[in-house]
Image: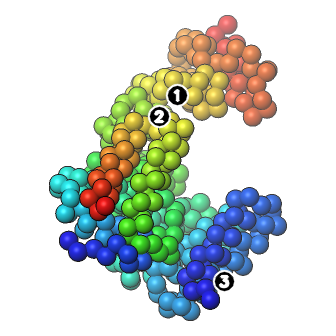
Amino acid sequence: MQVDLEKEMSMVDSFQEIVKLSEDYLDGDSINHLKKYFEGLVVTDLDDFYLNHIKTGDFINEMVLGIPERIERLLELKAPQVVIDFEVAALELLKRINSNLL
Amino acid sequence: MKSPLKIVKDLNNQARYLRETGDTNDFAAARPLLERAVAISEKALGPEHPVVAEGLSILALHLEDAENLAAARPLFERALAIYEKTLGPEHLFVARTLLFLAFHLHSTGDAEDFAIARSLYERALAIYEKVFGLEHPNVAHSLNDLAIYLWDTGDAEDFVVARTLYERALAIIEGYYGPASAEAGVILYQLGSLLGELNEFDLAETLLRRGLDITIEQSGRNSQDTLERIDKLAEVLEAKDNLRDISVLRKDCPKEPENLDHRNQTKSLLCKKYLSLVK
């Protein structure tokens, strides 16, 4: 799937680009996991999803760096293990995409 | 020269900083920044762009926090209309804004607004069910929101509906997070309390005891949550006219209630009352 990693776009559009990109490197379950992960972020986080524009390649890197901090915060909040596992799985999938892009 | 979107982003960040770190004056100063951000994004992108809706939502939430309730409602409504028009009626941003508006109407409105709030909660729930599937925790949270609303504003018939919603939410949460999770503990407390209102004392007691065990495990014997749950369980036991069982509460009451802070003392007085009944 052709994705322009250097094009700046809103976080929402970038989520879709990453899902498209994942079709080249991940199986169906993994793609679905990432999709659910992004949908979950939209519900739980109050970020400026349309205002914040970012290059998709940079966004993947940011998430790979940011998710461990997020996991730390969740551990401090004593979040259920299933929530932590969900984050860890998303992190691994994003790392896998990233390693294919290098 | 900065692009309009960069200016909007900077204004939002400044407002966020003032809200989070400042005093009352700083909090008030955040409003004109957020209003300017909306005005700039409207001019740059047109009045019906998701960025404008985002800005309107942030401004509405700020006004709600500042207790300027009358000004918040039309902003939530405009944000909702923009999202519906630009993203379609079943988008997650629509669901999120439906919930903002529903909470707003539920907490500030009159009987007419309550009826509108219910339909908004129901629409948000339907979107979450469609996007996440019937067994997802986001659906459970949405079921919980609607159940709280029905219990808070409804009649006996609504209480029965609220019960089924809590039961569904509990089943989802237990399946996802586990039956001894903190999340299950919260719903056990809510459902147990509602069953107490419905005079189903035996089942209420069972659920409240389970919820209490979880809360003690999660937050300790002397926490505010534990005291609230003891109080609710005691209410149900009292209603059952089964004072002997109140002795069970004894071990869960603070040993030195007079040493607790002021906030906890009211609750600890209730514990002392029940302890005296046992004695």
Above or below — where is B134 with respect to B248?
below
Q: Which residue is the extreme one toward the top?
A: B279
Whole-number angstrom distance, CA of label 3 to CA of label 2: 42 Å
Residue A100: image quadrant is bottom left
Q: Nearer the viewer, mark 3 or mark 2?
A: 3
Identify the amino acid type marked 2: Ala
Tell me what residue is drawn at x 54 percent, y 91 percent. B44
Q: Secondary structure at mark 1?
A: helix
Q: Residue at x 23, y 74 (%)?
A: A2
User: Decide: marks 2, 1 in contact (CB < 8 A)?
Assistant: yes
Q: Earlier in the sequence, mark 3 or mark 1?
A: 3
Q: Is residue A90 above or below residue B6?
A: above
Q: Is residue B247 left or right of residue B162?
A: right
Q: Which residue is mark 1?
A: B218
**Residue located at (25% from left, 66% from top):** A21
Q: Position of residue B56 (x, y in %)?
A: 57, 77
* Chain letter behind tag 2: B
Above or below, B3 against B279 in this view is below
Model colouring = rainbow
Residue flagged by tag 3: what amino acid is it? Arg
At label 1, which amino acid type do we have? Gln
For the C terminus of chain B, the image quarter is top right
- For label 2, the SS is helix
Say few, some or many: other residues with alpha carbon within 10 Å of mark 1 (under 14 / 14 to 19 / 20 or more): some
Q: Chain of mark 1?
A: B
Residue holding disc 2: B182
Image quadrant where residue B187 sits: top left
Q: What residue is at 58 percent from the left and 80 percent from the top? A: B6
- The residue that disc 3 covers is B36
